[in-house]
Image (cartoon, helix red, strand yellow):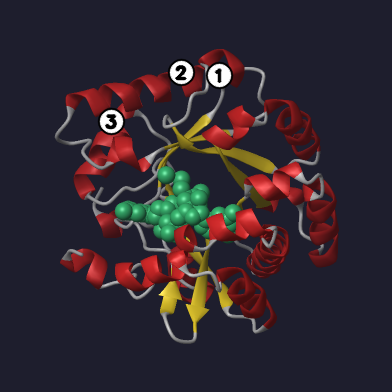
Amino acid sequence: HNEKEARSSFCFYNEDINKQIKDSLLLESDIRNALEKKEFFLTYQPKLNMATAEIEGVEALIRWQHPEHGIVSPINFIPAAEASGLILPLSEWVLDEACRQAKLWHTQGYKITTAVNISAGHFNNGKLLEDIDKTLKKYNLPAECLEIEITENMMMQNMDVIIPMLKALKARKVCISIDDFGTGYSSFAYLKSLPVDTLKIDRSFIKDLHHHKDDIHIVQAITNMAHKMGLKVVAEGVEEQEHCQQLCSIGCDVVQGYYISRPEKADNIQGLLDVAYISHLSI
Ligand code: C2E
Ligand code: MG
Ligand code: MG
Ligand code: MG
């Protein structure tokens, strides 16, 4: 871990412990137990619109406050949750908690969307729409305040199920993003038939942006295409000021990454929602 990573309380995971947890047969019952004991919590990572210099949304990212292992990364329990079927109660908890927080922000007058990562399990079991309707109603949250992120791979693997579902969500005005864009196998031809609002360009294209001309060309091409199709472009994994400058000249709309803010508990990003942020960051 470099110094930058070590500074964060939320993103500094102990790899050995996480590997141990991943390999553990106890994991399934652990997750069930953790749900009951309310050991999961959400962090939120802001998304900065470079044109308006405002935080226009946040992404909810789950964490597990493990009694022995400390904070456990989602990459080490989401797959196990998917495999065991516990992804459904976990996913429902994330949706509920994110909407509860989104309603608070909405009530306070913040014009932001709160994005939730939707797992394959939740999409495929047919309960997603019902859960979203139920939760929006429970908190009396306008659908425009909720965004869902689906990975490009998931989308492409389940097109038949997912397209009608996305259309139904779109009809409700829920925002839809394709996550990790560029790492999957989507044909551009499909994009025009998908009712999505936003492409989130995967971090792998961003991290060396200022050193690799090819990455610049890829990000430029994705951005041009997205704009022609009326889609918004978000760059994820923005860690350096140089990334921002490059992305700004490419015409990318929104940046998200450690340079703007780490994922933090809701209270800790409240300040960012209040300020016009660009001057502070000197982008
Ligand atoms: P993702 O949705 O693509 O989220 C982006 C990941 O990149 C997050 O990792 C975030 O903390 C990290 N990240 C953000 N900015 C930077 C940066 O500047 N540099 C670097 N190196 N990393 C950055 P995280 O929180 O560990 O989540 C990993 C993945 O786990 C997520 O990828 C998402 O697929 C999944 N996940 C997280 N929360 C949930 C959840 O509530 N439900 C589901 N189903 N999946 C989740
Ligand atoms: Mg995401
Ligand atoms: Mg992503
Ligand atoms: Mg990614």
- Quick one: label 1 or label 3, which is nearer the N terminus? 1
Q: Which mark is residue 229?
A: 1
Q: Nearer the viewer, residue 13 or 169?
A: 13
Q: Are marks 1 and 2 in contact (CB under 8 Å)?
A: yes
Q: Residue furthest left?
A: 211
**x and y percent of residue 46 in the render?**
46, 57
Categorize mark 1 by other alpha carbons within 10 Å: few (<14), some (14-19), many (20+): few
Q: Residue furthest top?
A: 189
278 vs 193: above or below: below
Q: Residue at x 80, y 60 (%)?
A: 135
203 vs 277: above or below: above
Q: Nearer the viewer, residue 239 or 232?
A: 239
Q: Which residue is mark 3?
A: 249
Q: Which residue is mark 2?
A: 225
Q: Are marks 1 and 3 in contact (CB under 8 Å)?
A: no
- Quick one: label 2 or label 3, which is nearer the N terminus? 2
Residue 110 occupies which quadrant of the picture? bottom right
- Which amino acid type is marked by label 1? Met
Is residue 114 something one can see in this rendering?
no
Q: In the image, 71: left or right of 116?
A: left
CA–CA distance in space, label 2 to label 3: 16 Å
In the picture, the quarter occupied by the N terminus is: bottom left
CA–CA distance in space, label 1 to label 3: 19 Å
- Which amino acid type is marked by label 2? Met
Q: Nearer the viewer, residue 179 or 255?
A: 179
Q: Secondary structure at mark 2?
A: helix
